Image (spheres, rainbow, N blue to C red):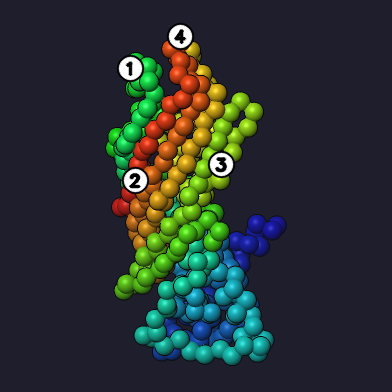
Amino acid sequence: MKKTIKKLTAVALAIVIAANLFTSAFAVLRGDVILDSKVNSMDALYILRYSVGLETEIDKKVADVNGDGQINSLDALGVLRISVGIDKGGEVEEDEEISAPSSAAEIVEMYNNAINKVVNDKAGYTKQRTTTIQEMNGGALLKIQLVKDMINEFLGVGTTEFTNHKGSSKHLLTASLTSEDIKSAHCEKTGQNYTVTLNLKDGSSSANAVSKKDSSALARCGLVTGKVADPQYDYLSSGCVYESISDVKDVSVKSIKAANTNVKIVAVIDAQGKLISLTASYDWTVEMESIKYTVVSVKQADGKAHTAVVVSDFKW
């Protein structure tokens, strides 16, 4: 019964909006997203549905009641306040521009929403990831070609391309960054698009036989990570590498520590909140203690690398 009521509500909203598209094209009341010349709970409901992905079309100029460049529950609340006379409403001018968000929290929310929309809507896209080794120290172990090949495979060294077909969701994860994860955040509006630039805080991870820890914001930005090292993953935590090494016959490691620095993300987002392009890059280091392969062992091995990820060619 609840599902039926939800479906009927959605259909009713769609019918109201479609019918009112044929009304006057003159000034619209701020918050009147269903275009019935009223600002009430029906508009608030539609804004809430849009904010969680249940609706895909909305006039952002009309829906952005508080003018922060985002469409969310705060706008729905603003509509309700207008509807009961607590706040004063007004008309949205045809040429009115929505300014880019300025606070770190607002910019991060815009970014998270754009990434999550890709995942929830199962948009198509292409992704290219390039990882280059800048330094590697492992003594006698690195003289064994099999070991070098295994390391390159674990870390996804080289350039790898992925295609995420529309209707699937494999090569990006949902994002859950907060302002606490950010060194700096900037958003610039150019035409109808927004360019979000995030510099994330440095992160670290560690793993051994009894514990695995990860404080990296990279793990929450939408790039792909997993439980074991795999070429399709964009970010490898210490725990991820530790589990992979533990699964290889005749190989053992006592502990692993990793760190990521210079993490920069640039996302271009359109006026509907859809991602146009995404680039991410970071430097990382890894230290391993007491590594052994068959009869060859070293007390310590370490390395430095750089990873860059480009996601583009979105199909909605």
User: Looking at the rendering, in which quadrant would you find the N terminus?
Assistant: bottom right
Residue 36 in sight: yes
- Marks 2 and 1 sit apart, C-alpha to C-alpha, by 28 Å
- Look at 47% across and 59% down and name the residue there: 183
> If you read the primary sequence from the N terminus, does the residue marked by circle 2 or circle 1 appear first?
1
Indicate the amino acid at tag 3.
Answer: Asp
C-alpha separation, residue under disc 3 versus residue under disc 2: 20 Å
Q: Residue at x 35, y 30 (%)?
A: 136
Earlier residue among tags 1 and 3: 1
Secondary element at tag 2: strand
Q: Is residue 227 visible?
A: no
Q: Nearer the viewer, mark 1 or mark 3?
A: 1
Mark 1: secondary structure: helix
Q: In this view of the protein, which residue sits in the foreground, 112 or 229?
A: 229
Residue under label 2: 308
Who comes first in sequence, dot 3 or dot 4? 3
Query: Residue beneath label 4, please?
Result: 295
Mark 3 vs mark 4: in front: 4
CA distance for labels 4 and 1: 13 Å
Residue at 66% x, 62% y: name it.
5
Dot 2 crowding, Cα within 10 Å, few <14, some 14–19, many 20+: some
The amino acid beneath tag 4 is Val
Which is more toward the observer, 134 or 104? 134
What number is the disc on residue 143? 1
Callout 1: 10 Å neighbours few (<14), some, many (20+)?
Answer: few
Mark 1–mark 3 distance (CA, rounded to whole Å): 31 Å
